[in-house]
Amino acid sequence: MNYSMVAVLSFSMLVPAAHAETLPNPMVVQAPQVIPTLDGGGSQVGRLSSFVLTLSRQYTPQNQLSTPWHLDYFYGNGNAGETQGGSQIFTIDLLDKDGNVLVKDLIGNLNVPRYKCWYGGGSPQKAEGTINFDDTNKDITGMRINVSRVSGSQGKC
């Protein structure tokens, strides 16, 4: 199930003086909407929300450009009728102002943390890495979160 998200972009970054004029500012894309996570039968078994993706450009010690990314999001599955266990992934697509996909599966498959019940409404989650992507001169205005259905064995929370 795919959900389109409206993005809020902001920019700020400190870079070494030698490269300050050549690096773009980091891009921050936010998607605060709640996305239900579903099992194979279509029942809601959890929820994802509050996505904040930051893409930065930096030079490595070998003077090569890289794009570190950092993702903050929220996951909960401790409400009545929700489950833990099984396997579930999500991916992120970047969109232009018309909702067209500019970059599909930007950071690859990310696992939904279904290994336990996240009670009390859920818990903040983080993921980070580095990708080969340059957002310079791209008309990125949103992101879509693509969530698979749960597969494998589940247990009640």
Image (tube, helix red, strand yellow):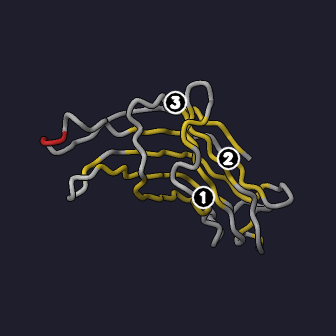
Q: Tell me which amino acid carries mark 1.
A: Gly
Do residues under tags 3 and 2 come within 8 Å of each other at their CB atoms?
no
Q: Is residue 67 left or right of residue 141?
A: left
- Residue 11, image quadrant: top left
Q: Residues within 10 Å of mark 3 (few under 14, many from 20)?
A: some
Q: Nearer the viewer, residue 78 or 19?
A: 19
What x and y, as percent, mark residue 15? 20, 43
Residue identifier under label 3: 141
**Residue located 75% across and 63% down the image:** 150
**Pair 3/1: label in front:** 3
Q: Are marks 3 and 1 in contact (CB under 8 Å)?
A: no
Tell me which residue sits at (72%, 54%) in the image.
37
Position of 97 with respect to 14 (left or right) is: right
Q: Earlier in the sequence, mark 3 or mark 2?
A: 2
> Which one is closest to the eye, mark 2 or mark 1?
2
Q: Which label's residue is closer to the chain start, 2 or 1?
A: 2
Q: Which residue is mark 1?
A: 122
Q: Nearer the viewer, residue 113 or 149?
A: 149
According to the picture, the residue beneath numbered tag 2 turns out to be 35
